[in-house]
Amino acid sequence: MEAEIKAIAWINGHWRTLKNTHLPLENRSLLLADGIFETLLILNGICQLLEEHVARWHYSAISLGLEPPPSQYELIDVLAEVIKQSGIKTGALRLNWVRAQGGERGINFSKKEQLSVKNRCWIIITPITPCFQPVSAILSIYEQRNQASRVIHHKTPAYNQSIQARYEAQQIGVDEALLTSTGGELACSSCATLLIFNKENWLTPPMSAGCLSGVMRRNSIKLGLAKVQTVMPVQLFGNFDDMEGPAVLLNSLGCRPISRLNGATVVGAFPMEIAISKAREFFMLVLRNYSPL
């Protein structure tokens, strides 16, 4: 009987199960969510869009005043060993990086350069299958994206807003929540980029709406598969400015069509089988243009 493949973690040069992986309680990621991370897809044992994810990891560190995390060159052998040790051929890999300890209580941090990566960099790999199943969604009443915030454009461990938006949806039996900006335009979902199809193009909200510039979002724009345009919630409910196509939620681990929003069928939503097929096609097109499969 084939052994069950489980999630594993790498930290400080050691491999452990998630249950047996420990961080000191002074770690700023635990205490203050003061860190950054990237989640990327593994297909056929290969890290997809690794260069793009590591580049954004470094950009986030610079933007938020953290010291640079390990480079792609430094990660290559470790990642290969992580995948080998786990036996995972299709999965999610998360790169974590945290600010160095400040040596005192509170939010202040050391301004001295600290080169040690001990307890600051860890990797988690989990078996998953890319998801293309349709989701129902609501427009969140309570959570909005603050487009003026610097933090909002980076992946940090502070997922409170996303968790609360998802909780709000699940409380009424819905899968997902869409968030608007404080200005009222659509921004994203709790954990994915929003794309809406009109008669000719996929459209995605601009960064000025407070969305996260995900790697898949950025690449779909570079490939000419999507265009940046302000989108208002009303455009998902009726024929408005030629908005007659489906909507999907895209991230590095899948592309999920929105079937219903606030209880109403999304304008132009395809039948389930077609919606799943088109979502998968769009997702794989972005990957195939950037990564070896």
Image: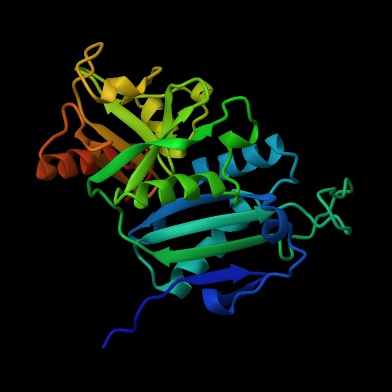
Left/right of residue 175 with respect to residue 108 in the rendered view: left
Q: Position of residue 271 (x, y in %)?
A: 10, 39
Left/right of residue 177 with respect to residue 278 in the rendered view: right
Residue in the picture at 62% in, 63% down: 122
Give whichever of 228, 183 is nearer the camera. 183
Residue in the picture at 53% in, 49% down: 38
Left/right of residue 271 with respect to residue 111 in the rendered view: left
Give above or below for 161 relative to 207: below
Give whichever of 2, 74 is nearer the camera. 2
Q: Position of residue 196 (x, y in %)?
A: 29, 27
User: Residue 231, located in which quarter of the rendered image?
Assistant: top left
- Quadrant where the N terminus lies? bottom left
Q: Position of residue 36 (x, y in %)?
A: 62, 48
User: Residue 225, located in which quarter of the rendered image?
Assistant: top left
Q: Position of residue 140 (x, y in %)?
A: 41, 37
Colouring scheme applied when the structure was drawn: rainbow
Considering every residue shown, the one lying at the far top of the view is: 241
Give above or below for 162 relative to 223: below
Residue in the picture at 54% in, 77% down: 19
Q: Is residue 12 visible?
A: yes
User: Residue 90, located in which quarter of the rendered image?
Assistant: bottom left
Considering every residue shown, the one lying at the far bottom of the view is: 1
Q: Is residue 17 visible?
A: no
